[in-house]
Image: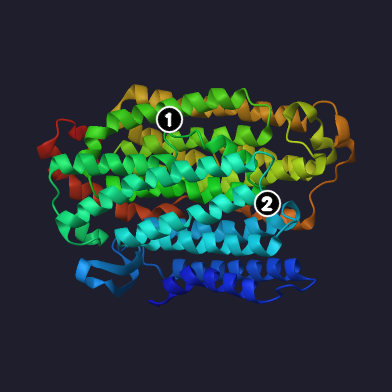
C-alpha cells in the first residue's frame, strides 16, 4: 500500500485550485482554462481514488493508508488520517460525482467561472479531509470548511432567492456545528485527547454519553437533515445551480449521516439505544411528511429536494435500528441516493435550461423532443422509487430488514416511502415528459454528447449497484459487523432493549 496516496487524493484538488487561481488570470480564455484545469484535476483524483480502492484490503476492518503527524501534541491533538471501509466508499462517491458536476457546469454556470472552479475544488478537498479524518478536531475543521464553498455556490451562482437560501444554509449548519464543538471540548477535557480511536476507548459515563450523543444528533441532524431541522433544504437545493445541488444532495448531506454513524453508532452504542425510539419516529415522520409535501410542489427541483429529504429519513431509520442489516442498508442507501439524486438534478437542469422554466405546469411532451433524456430520466426515476435492479432497492431492502427487528410498524411506515415515492415521482415524470407539448417545448433538442457523458456513467453505476451490490458491501460490512459484535455484550448488560443490537446473521 502507498501511505501517501490518501494525502495526495485529499490535497490534489487544493493544488488544482491554486493553479486555477494563478494560471490564466485576466486572460481572454480565463473561464475555459479554469474549466479544463479543474476537470482534469478532478479526473486525476478519480483515477487515484480507483487505485486507493484497488489497494484497499476489505478483509481488514481497521484503518488503512494512515498518516499521523504531530500537530498540537501537548494537547493530545494530532493530524491523523486514514480510511476504513466506511470512509472509503464516501471518498469514492465524492471523487465520482465531482468531475461529473464540473462537466455539468459547462452550460449552467456562465459567470465567474474561474471562481466557481476554485470553489468546487476546495469543496472536494474539504470532503476528502472530512471522510478521512481520524482526529475529532481535524474532522471539525474539515466539516466547517465544507460550509464556506457550499454557501458561496448557492449565494453567488444560485437562482432569484439565492441569498436567502445561502444564509439559511449557513446559519443552520454553523449553528448545529456549535453543538459538536461543545461536545468536542467536553470529550477532550475528560479524555485528554481528540484522537477518535482514543475517544472510543475513553470510557465515558452513561450520562455523559447521552449528552454527547444529543450534541452530535443536533449537529449532524441539520446536515442530514432530521425533521424538523430541514427548513434550509428546499430553498438551498432548488436555488443552487445544478452542479452545486448535485454535490449538496449527493455528498454534503451524507456528511451528517456519516457523522451520526461515526460518532453515534460506532462510538456510543449504548446511548444510541436510549435515543433510537425518538430518532426512528423522526425518521418515519420525515419520510411521510416529505413525500406529501413533494407531491404538492409545482417546481421540478423542489420535488427532487423533498424527495431527497424523504430518503434521508429512510437512512436515519436504518442507522438507528442498530442492527447490522439496517446500518449496512443505510450506508448503501447513502451511496445509491448520492448517485441517483445527482442524476435527477442533472436531468431537471437539462430540461429547465432549454425551456427556461422549472414550473411543472408549464411543461409537457418533453419526451417527444428529448427521447434519450426521457429514457435516462425513467431509469433514475425508477431507481429513486426503489425498483429492483437498482441500488436504491438494495439499500431500502436492507434497511427494512433491520427495521423489522425493531418493530413491525417502523418497518411498515418506513416502507411507505417506496409507495409514496412512486406517486410523486411518476406524477412528475408524467406531467413533464408526456402529455401535449406546451410552450417552447417544441423547440427543445435532445441531450448533447457532453450531457450524455455526464448522465451515462451515473446510469451505469445505478444499475451496477443494483445488480452487484457485493462489490460495495464487502468494503464496509466488516467494519459494521465488528462494531455490532463489539457492542453486543455491553448492550445486553446495560439495556432491556438488547434486541435492537441483533448482529448475527
Q: CA distance from mark 1 to mark 2?
A: 33 Å
State the residue position of label 1: 228
State the residue position of label 2: 455
Viewer-proximal residue among 205 and 46: 205
User: Where's residue 7, x and y in %?
Assistant: 43, 72
User: Where's residue 202, x and y in %?
Assistant: 15, 55
**Pointer 1: residues within 10 angstroms few (<14), some, or many (20+)?**
few
Residue at 54%, 43% in the rendered image = 167
Residue 12 lies left or right of residue 371; in this view the side is: left
Residue 143 lies left or right of residue 441; in this view the side is: left
The reply to whether residue 385 is visible in this rendering is: no
Tag 1, which secondary structure?
A: loop
Residue at 40%, 31% in the rendered image = 283
Q: Quadrant of residue 101?
A: bottom right
Viewer-proximal residue among 281 and 124: 124
Residue at 54%, 45% in the rendered image = 249
Tag 2, which secondary structure?
A: helix
Q: Is residue 341 above or below residue 473?
A: above
User: Where's residue 201, x and y in %?
Assistant: 16, 56
**Pointer 2: residues within 10 angstroms few (<14), some, or many (20+)?**
many
Amino acid at each position: 500500500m502507498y501511505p501517501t496516496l490518501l494525502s495526495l487524493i485529499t490535497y490534489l484538488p487544493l493544488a488544482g485550485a491554486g493553479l486555477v487561481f494563478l494560471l490564466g488570470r485576466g486572460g481572454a480564455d480565463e473561464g475555459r482554462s479554469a474549466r479544463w484545469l479543474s476537470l482534469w484535476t478532478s479526473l486525476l483524483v478519480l483515477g487515484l481514488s480507483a487505485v486507493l480502492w484497488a489497494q484497499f484490503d476489505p478483509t481488514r476492518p481497521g484503518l488503512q493508508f494512515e498518516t499521523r503527524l504531530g500537530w498540537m501534541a501537548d494537547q493530545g491533538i494530532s493530524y491523523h488520517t486514514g480510511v476504513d471501509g466506511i470512509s472509503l466508499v464516501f471518498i469514492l462517491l465524492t471523487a465520482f460525482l465531482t468531475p461529473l458536476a464540473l462537466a455539468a457546469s459547462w452550460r449552467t454556470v456562465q459567470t465567474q467561472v474561474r471562481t466557481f472552479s476554485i470553489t468546487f475544488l476546495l469543496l472536494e478537498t474539504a470532503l476528502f479531509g472530512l471522510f478521512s479524518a481520524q482526529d475529532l478536531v481535524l474532522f471539525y475543521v474539515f466539516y466547517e470548511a465544507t460550509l464556506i464553498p457550499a454557501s458561496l455556490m448557492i449565494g453567488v451562482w444560485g437562482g432569484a432567492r439565492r441569498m436567502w437560501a445561502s444564509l439559511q444554509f449557513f446559519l443552520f449548519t454553523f449553528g448545529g456545528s456549535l453543538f459538536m464543538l461543545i461536545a468536542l471540548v467536553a470529550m477532550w477535557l475528560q479524555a485528554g485527547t481528540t484522537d477518535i480511536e482514543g475517544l472510543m476507548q475513553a470510557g465515558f459515563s452513561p450520562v455523559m454519553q447521552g449528552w454527547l450523543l444529543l450534541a452530535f444528533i443536533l449537529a449532524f441532524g441539520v446536515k442530514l437533515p432530521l425533521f424538523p431541522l430541514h427548513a434550509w433544504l428546499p430553498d438551498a437545493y432548488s436555488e443552487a445551480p445544478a452542479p452545486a445541488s448535485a454535490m449538496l444532495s449527493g455528498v454534503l448531506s451524507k456528511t451528517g449521516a456519516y457523522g451520526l454513524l461515526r460518532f453515534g453508532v460506532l462510538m456510543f452504542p449504548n446511548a444510541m439505544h436510549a435515543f433510537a425510539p425518538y430518532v426512528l419516529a423522526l425518521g418515519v415522520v420525515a419520510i411521510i411528511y416529505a413525500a406529501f409535501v413533494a407531491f404538492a410542489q409545482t417546481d421540478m427541483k423542489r420535488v427532487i429536494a423533498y424527495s431527497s429529504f424523504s430518503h434521508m429519513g429512510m437512512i436515519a431509520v436504518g442507522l438507528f435500528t442498530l442492527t447490522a442489516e439496517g446500518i449496512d442498508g443505510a450506508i448503501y442507501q447513502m451511496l445509491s441516493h448520492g448517485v441517483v439524486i445527482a442524476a435527477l438534478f442533472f436531468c431537471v437542469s437539462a430540461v429547465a435550461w432549454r425551456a427556461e422554466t422549472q414550473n411543472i405546469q408549464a411543461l409537457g411532451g418533453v419526451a417527444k423532443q428529448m427521447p434519450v433524456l426521457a429514457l435516462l430520466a425513467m431509469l433514475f426515476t425508477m431507481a429513486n422509487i426503489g425498483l429492483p435492479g437498482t441500488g436504491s432497492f438494495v439499500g431500502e431492502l436492507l434497511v427494512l430488514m433491520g427495521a423489522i427487528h425493531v418493530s413491525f410498524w417502523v418497518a411498515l411506515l418506513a416502507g411507505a416511502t417506496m409507495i409514496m415515492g412512486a406517486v410523486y415521482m411518476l406524477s412528475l415524470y408524467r406531467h413533464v415528459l408526456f402529455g401535449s407539448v406546451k410552450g417552447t417545448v417544441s423547440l427543445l433538442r435532445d441531450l448533447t454528447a457532453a450531457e450524455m457523458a455526464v448522465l451515462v456513467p451515473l446510469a451505469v453505476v445505478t444499475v451496477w449497484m443494483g445488480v452487484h451490490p457485493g462489490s460495495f458491501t464487502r468494503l464496509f460490512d466488516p467494519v459494521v459487523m465488528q462494531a455490532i459484535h463489539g457492542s453486543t455484550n455491553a448492550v445486553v448488560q446495560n439495556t432491556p432493549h438488547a434486541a435492537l443490537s441483533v448482529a448475527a446473521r
